[in-house]
Image (cartoon, helix red, strand yellow):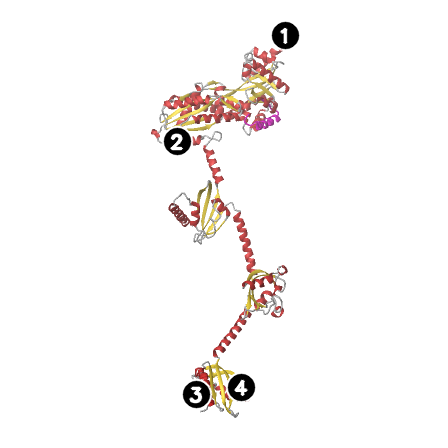
Amino acid sequence: MSQTALADSGSDALYRQMVQGVKDYAIYLIDPSGVVSNWNAGAQRAKGYTAQEIVGQHFSRFYTEPDRAAGLPQRALDCALREGKFEGEGWRLRQDGTRFWAHVVIDPIFGEEGALIGFAKITRDLTAQVEASRRTTEQERLFRLLVQGVTDYAIYLLDPEGVVSNWNAGAQRAKGYTAQEIVGQHFSRFYTLDDRRAGLPQRALATALATGKFEGEGWRLRRDGSRFWAHVVIDPIRDEMGTLVGYAKITRDLTAQKLQSDRMKAVSDNLDLALAHMSQGLCLFDAQERLVLSNERMRSLLQLPETAIRPGATLTDLLWELHADPAVDYEETAAKVRALRLAHLAALAATRETVNEEMLRQDRYLSVSHRALPAGGWVTTLDDITERRQIEDRIVHLAHHDTLTALPNRVTFRDRLEAALAGGAQARCALLYLDLDRFKPVNDTLGHPVGDAVLQTVAQRITAQLRKNDVVARLGGDEFAVLMDGCDKVQEVNRLAERLIREISRPMQVNGQQVVVGVSIGIACAPRHGTDPDLLLRNADLALYRAKEHGRACHRTYEPDMELVVQQRRDLEQDLRRALELGEFTLHFQPVVDTGRGQITGCEALLRWESPKRGRVPPGDFIPFAEEIGMMSEIGDWVLRAACREAAGWVQPLTVSVNLSVTQFHREDLLARVSLALAESGLPAERLELEITETAMIDDVVGATAILEQLRRLGIRIALDDFGTGYSSLSFLRNLPFTRIKIDRSFVHDLGIKPEAAAIVRAVTGMCDSLKVSVTAEGVETERQMAMLQAEGCAELQGFLISRPCPSAELAVWMDDYARARAGEAEAVLA
């Protein structure tokens, strides 16, 4: 064999090996009639036939029955001969009858002489690629249908410049544009003018490009110009090479949600505003014991740092904040917190309503209310009740203490006394009842501010002499009481009483004036003098009364015979009430004369009591007692009516003077009672003169002025009785509407004895003369007194020298005698 033949023979072998080695392509020859001549491994793999099975078979067996019936195998060969090549795709059959999608290339093969040898046929199984393509096409179709079918979202594409490329139904629904109207338009037309000027559309694309995504919300415009609130997502779209091809834009109309959100925000803002400005602290815990919300007032009231009260914090967290103490052991605090938590939850579970408690937080009292919620959890509110507690404490203090001296009052003292006597016969205590001597003159002459200061000083002096467990109280007015609990030794009690008398009697400086008062003390000891609080108080009071009878500034201990005094006072009260009911009171009248003119100017009505049992009772023995027990107002009314009635029957139209008691003067219906007495008697108002002491007016000068002016408008005359004994008498003269001043009998008595008495009479007479006010001297008993009064310019006199008080019938006789005597004196002068 030649070298060329050998070489060709080697090449053929290589070609055969190459063709036989290809497994992804079916490569084989068919003769001019279409019969398979050879077969490679790729053909066997693709179609399932071995070479032995298929060589000699017509290649048309690979076609489906419809393709064979249509002549497709022969047409392929004819096309290859005619065109020089056939290429196509279609379904082919494997040996097992299954189909595969084949890409077929058929080339005609010619010999060296140009004769047709057969056809080279290359077939590739593209079933997988076709299926993948089909799936891709189907998916793209589904994606197109999905996007086009979505109506709640505007989904569309933008090109790299922001121009709309496509448009779905959701976009048309949201923005009102059809695809034909908007595709090709720039997407910025959906933005408001202000947003466009601010460059928002371009910034959105730039953000999407820079970060891979833009997401935001804002107002967008519909085709008709109306606004809607849009939630927008923009994603950049790139091809396989990473080149930007545009943007996918998804927009959802959230206008309803925006409006709802705005409403909820407004509600939330208002809630926050309300919570921030509540006077109460408030917090809400859920069923898991976690804090949902709280206000600043809560944190402020609990005086906690800002980080202590935060949403999500547990009840345990809050309790730790409230009770943690670096000085206390951790385990002890933990146990306390656990106990408080369990107690709180148990209380809520037990009531399922409201649990109220109080807590003290750094000197502030807080009222805490926990209200359980139906779904679990609770609401807690806090109120700062510090001021209320202080007021309540102050009220309690005031209810149990004297406001002037800050000492316990009568109620508190009685409670302490009752506690001390709880042991009955085994009780050991002493009760000292104190009453100040000479206090009323100090209070009346120097005024109530001085009197109050005296009482405060006395309270301090008493307290300074007591043991630690002793109690002192102000019972009222100038009365005090001391309880020596656990002590009934006479010597020790007497020593305390003597110290109190000595200390209280020391002079005291008050408002620049020296004041001296004394004290009388009554003592009763348990169990000797009783084990009942009221009995012991009464017995001490009886002992005090005995001390005052024995000259004051002393102390006396209760004795059984002191009961007689109580009985006497009780009998006197009964007799006084009976006297008023049975008409045992009478009036005597003492005339007032103008010695200069020799005329009677009026008469003073004076109360007298002729008792069937007691006989004639001096006024000084029953009038102060009547005032003390509250009867003087009723008795005074009787005196006023009786005096007006008597005076209305006098022949001479004289003025009748009636003394008003302190109680009468302070009655709200005084004016009505006086008017009624005048109306019932028919006495003209200008014939009635009411005598009032300075003591009755000193407490309320403004109110007294108003009352007196009302009386003066009726025509009634007003006299200031006992002038000269009061601290403010001179100011009274200038400011109050008096028509007469009565110089007190004490000054008249001292005329010729004390030089200052004449000076005072002279000054008062001169002052009254300048003020055009009448002046009368009381208690004139001697010719010398009368002469001195007349010498000082005081001609109107009243007293025993002129006439003793007498009944109305005797007064008429006296007045006739006085008139005849004056007439005789006048005739003697003329003769």
Q: Which residue is mark 1?
A: 828
Q: CA distance from mark 2 to mark 1?
A: 80 Å
Q: Is residue 503 above or below residue 253?
A: above
Q: Earlier in the sequence, mark 1 or mark 3?
A: 3
Q: Earlier in the sequence, mark 2 or mark 3?
A: 3
**Mark 2 surroundings: few (<14), some (14-19) or many (≥20) residues within 10 A:** some
Question: Is residue 705 found inside the magenta-colored segment of the image?
Answer: yes
Q: Secondary structure at mark 3?
A: helix
Give the image location of residue 108, x and y in percent.
51, 88
**Which numbered mark, 4 or 1, is in the foreground of this view?**
4
The amino acid type, in three-letter code, at marker 2 is Glu
The amino acid type, in three-letter code, at marker 1 is Ala
Give the image location of residue 216, x and y in percent.
56, 60
Q: Earlier in the sequence, mark 3 or mark 4?
A: 3
| Quarter of the rendering occupied by the C terminus | top right
Give the image location of residue 517, x and y in percent.
48, 21
**Which numbered mark, 2 or 4, is in the foreground of this view?**
4
Residue 85 - label? 4
Occupied quadrant, residue 151? bottom right
**Which numbered mark, 2 or 3, is in the foreground of this view?**
3
Q: Secondary structure at mark 1?
A: helix
Q: CA distance from mark 2 to mark 4?
A: 136 Å
Residue 295 - label? none
Q: Which residues are magenta?
A: 698-719
| Quarter of the rendering occupied by the N terminus | bottom left
